[in-house]
Amino acid sequence: MFDNRTSYFNVQGNKASFKQNIKLFQSLRAKLQQAKSKSKEPIRGQLKTLKRFEDVIDEPQMQQRAVTTQKKLTHLIEEQEQRQEEINPMRYNLMQLLVLMGKKEHYFDKLGKDEFKLIRVGQRSKESVDEHIQKIKKFLSNKVRYKYRTSFKMQFQIQLDLLKYVPKKKSMTIKNSQRDYEIDEDEDTSKKKKISARGYQDFSNWKKKNNVAQNQKVFIITNGYHALRDSLLERNWAENEDAYSPFFDLKWTCGLRSDDFLNLMDFQQINHFDSNQCLCSKFGLARNMRCIPNWESFFPRCYDLGDLVDFSDFIEDFKISKIHSILMEFDQNQSINQNKKVLPEPHEETEHKNTLRLKDFKNITIRAMEEKPQTFIINFRERFKIRLCIMILNRVVCSLGSMVKNILKDEFPFVHPGEWLQLMRDPENAKDVQINEQIEMILKANGYEDQEGDKFIQKYGSQIKDLLKQLNRNPQNSLQGTRNIWIVKPEYSSRGRGIKCLDDLNQILDTVNKETMNYVAMKYIENPLIIKNRKFDIRQWVLVTELVPLKIYFYNECYIRFSAEEFDIDQFQNKFAHLTNNAIAKHSQKFYESDIKGNMWTQEEFQQYLVEQYGWDVFAEKIQSKLKEIVVNSLKCCCDQMKNRRRSFEVYGYDFMIDEQFNTWLIEVNMSPSSDTTTPVTAQIIPKMLEDIMKVVVDNQSKTKKKVGGFQLIYNSDTKLQ
């Protein structure tokens, strides 16, 4: 009745596939009409083949469900025709995610064995299907630890319905559990809030009880910030030490919940905007930066691995980047080994001892080849991989018209699972590859030139260079190296906790699947600018005093944070060499051995070094202007998603990195950036910066002449100041 090759779970957006499904349901209805007078058992047996309409009790219910699904598919075809231009080629369809990859890419739980038998696996046997089902179910045992922050598109909705998975219900369950977790406080905290709430409207009585003058301002500060406390005390403010008290004129805290904003009085100042996760969370930043034109020039590719669509894009991006890195490495090696050395002719007296003959073939092992490396440039296995990489990248750089045709033919993703398996296959486990390599070794040892390798380079070398040249047009190519490293970060962690640098897809999937938290994956900058053999980043403070109109202040002094150990791209799992956060670096045994005191520089030291090293003021002429541009664009993109409040303000810690071409890259944005003064640089800069914040948000409230200290107003949406 049904063709085993039909993909019933095609969600690619292929119009033809959906029409096939409609015809399938129409034929089903026709058979039902013909079988009215016959026994119902054969009909139910046929329905079990589809199994998407399981739990059908009688014929009317079955007909109604078929009609409903047909309407959904018809509506989907119309929607796809309207949105054809929006089709994203970098998509895995559900069939490939669930079956062909066979890993953790699919996020549904509690799916029974019978429901999985719906999935057609080509011409596989029943035993193969059962084995594959068990493998998939093993990875689906984790209980939907990925949060769906956006609703699924229509093309996913049908499959979710058929799998008895209700995303809206699941999303509500997750949201409710998060809300319960957020409001789950200990008894002491609840008591304090209740006691404080009783006298919420009687601020003057509180001042009398605490011997505070009626005209005296009151502040609350939590989690340190001693320099800020001293600054307010010098202004004759009084401190309220009760962190949960509602009596204050200004409150400085590390974070607030949305409910806390509801209890604020109009005159009260707070150092946060509501709903700032769109900028300060890792998944929020990843989504919103992609809304900015030319984001590829300043923000590394970043994917929210808790989102089905983002996860699909990451899988495809990882594979394309890996193929790109293979060709880059090949091109670099050929450039280095242009002058290939030819094996010398063997001496006549020792020729019979040194010459390998075909009869010795069985005695040659892979280990022997590794112990005695040969001089031929490229073996059979490598030639195959390079040709396959060229073929795949030609799809990536094809014209838009060709790309659309490939999409409509369902020839995407760019890297088919079978091709990926070939590229990642270990040659030592492939007997046919071993044989070819051994034959080539025998020929080479007997004095033959690697003519096939030479012809291969002549034929494909120019194609590789052309492909790399086309890929270089993308600004993201500045991040690319020969290792294809990605940074995997927990979404809600800080101070470098839980961050890993990985270059293996299976390791990334294992990391994501084992933990209970969500992750994002960001492309690692493989060719960063290095100073004194160390990697570094830039911490820049930004102050926003209003969202409507948007007012952005840029602090005139940043500081540079260095890694604790020397940079080595091959040792990318050494966090002390690749992560620059001081909270991580201080735990390295080499932290105090560096000639960079405290592993930090001031902006002046950094600027002077670049002038001495490169002969021009790189920071002033290129880097700083780019920092300001990125800050303005990021806040303009996110400000509409935050809730404006007249007396709110916020300080953000922007982290940037510089590559070897002096391109500036935004890494993340931190709310409540660290105010630790544990190094000479931070002890010098941070107290001054906190004092300048008070000049902007406190002193300017009552004075005509505006004091801004070291802050510069770089954007005001009222005046279009830039």
Image: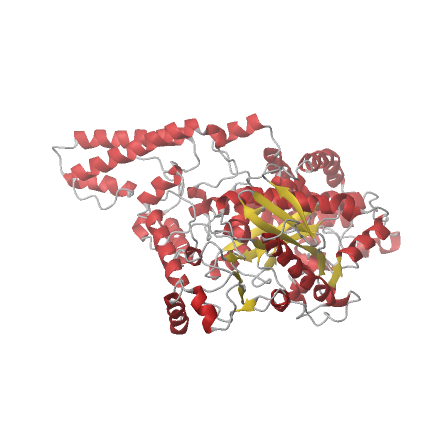
Left or right of 103 on screen, residue 18: left
Please determine whether, in this image, residue 26 is positioned above or below residue 441. above
Q: Position of residue 205 (x, y in %)?
A: 43, 68
Whether residue 594 is visible: yes
| Colouring style | secondary structure
Please name the residue shown 42% across and 43% down the image: 94
Which residue occupies 24% across, 38% down?
Answer: 65
The answer to which quarter of the image holds residue 608 is: bottom right
Q: Quadrant of residue 383?
A: top right
Q: Which of these two is toward me, 103 or 454?
A: 103
The foreground one among 518 and 66 is: 518
On the image, the x and y values in percent for residue 63 come to 20, 35
The answer to whether any part of residue 479 appears in the image is no
Of 134 and 359, which appears nearest the observer? Answer: 134
What is the quadrant of the N terminus in the image?
Answer: top left
In the visual, does 361 lie left or right of 419?
right
Please give left or right for residue 424 compared with residue 160 in the image: right
Q: Is residue 431 above or below residue 52?
A: below
Q: Position of residue 107 (x, y in %)?
A: 41, 51
